[in-house]
Image: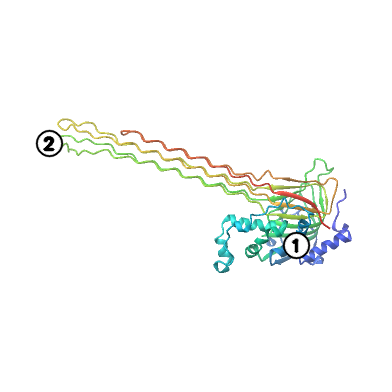
Amino acid sequence: MMVKHFKDLSDEQVAKFNARCAQLGVDPSKIQTSVTTAGAENGLHCGHPAANSTFPPANILKVANVAQLKALCACKDEDYVRGLESDAQVRYPQPLSELALPPLSSHGRDVALIENFMTETQKAAVVQALHAFLVGNSNKVKDYEAIINAIHFPMSLAVYAAQDITITAANPLVLDSDQIGLYNFGVVTVEPGGSIQVVTAAQMDSQVFNGQTALGGAGGTVPTINFRGANGSDGTDGTAGTDGSNGGNAVQGSPSGNNCDCNNPSPVAATASGNGTAGSAGTRGADGSISGTSVFSLGAISGPIQVTYIGGVGGKGGAGKAGGKGGNGGNAAGAAAAPCNNSYAGTPSGNGANGGNGGNGGNGANGPNVTIYYTSITSDTTFSIDTSSIAAGAGGASGAGGAAGSGGTGGGTAGNPGTAGVPGITGSPGTLSARLQPA
């Protein structure tokens, strides 16, 4: 199959490309005609202009609020309202009324202070509402609009544009704008083994998407869109408990001459031993993370596309450590010689301490909602998703109980072992929705 380039586009496709450029504040006559990842070691990054002077952004777009950003995205409310599309795959947050958020009028309307009084659950719900606003029916999260705008807007978004972009197997195209990236390409060609790696949420447009497999097609590598997340860090291990001190042995006095006080030398009673201290618990592993929801409006697609995740595994919980051993008890002193005939008892040995608990494993990342729009597909076009990487972290091992001390008049008790940490929760798999572009 012949690979199309920008010069092969129809007048209608060129007009759509130019219209999108205008919407993003870009002059189509001033953008690069051809971009390739071939010479970009570690990938061609979009989102860090200082590190990629060969492909700088075409514009920095100021976006005042979430409604304005929604207007730039391919997912339209009316398609859901009219029943043209289903939003069953969109993860909507719980109703705002159930979150008990601090009111925007509090703390002198200082958003930074308001955020300081929000829990991580509340912050995550607002981010989830932002993504749902963009890719779902925004009417269902309308109650979140004010808090979304207060916390996340205004935004300054980098816009990248080119007529033709070619992605090679050796070097991916990496979409890692600071917040949400906006990308407009006339023709995207993904060579066999090439990939688009998504680090932050993205809206990417093209008129033609050439998804090439290896020569002959059969058995070739599939062009992929990889959502690159971060694995959670492992929890730290606890510290071992300390051993208890040993008790002192009794010392018997003895008579001296006619002295029957038995104080030469002075007698000493046995002293008590100390208990061991407990081992401390391991800490919880951190959660994995993967970037937010993205939309790809790719136009005429040829070849298969697979969405995959890289990273996002929860961290392993830290191991609990052993409790300290109980100290040995002091030994008794036997009866003294006549005329004293007194004795001193020993003391019990100390108790062993409990072992620390293992830390819980971190949760695997939640996969994002990914939407792909197309105007046409070829007979070999398929859409698939692989979510196997977002596993939960393992729980940490438990610490052993400390041993009891020995000696003295009786043995102490051994400490109990700690409990093993609980594994984290596997992340929700995310969704892939492929849709015909509405007219």
Q: Which mark is residue 34?
A: none
Q: Is residue 401 left or right of residue 48?
A: left
The answer to whether any part of residue 172 appears in the image is no
**Amino acid type, residue under disc 1 in the picture:** Leu
- Report helix, strand or loop for mark 1: helix
- In the displayed image of the protein, which residue is found farthest to the left? 258
Q: Position of residue 194 (x, y in %)?
A: 76, 49
Can I make out residue 80 in this image? yes
Nearer-the-camera pick, 3 or 330: 330
List x then y, in percent, for residue 47: 69, 60
Position of 131 compared to 379: left or right? left
Q: How far across and down, in percent of the image, does residue 347 sit?
A: 30, 36
Q: Residue at x 75, y 62 (%)?
A: 72
Closer to the camera, 175 or 352?
352
Q: CA distance from mark 2 to mark 1?
A: 106 Å
Q: Which mark is residue 259?
A: 2
Residue in the picture at 71% in, 64% down: 67
- Which residue lies under the disc numbered 1? 72
Point out the tag, 2 or 1, that comes first from the N-terminus: 1
Task: Name the amino acid type tagged 2.
Answer: Asn
Secondary structure beneath dot 2 equals loop
Q: State the image quarter where residue 253 is shown.
A: top left
The structure's colour scheme is rainbow
Q: Where is residue 317 shown, x and y percent of the image?
A: 55, 44
Which class describes the residues within 10 Å of circle 2: few (<14), some (14-19), or many (20+)?
few
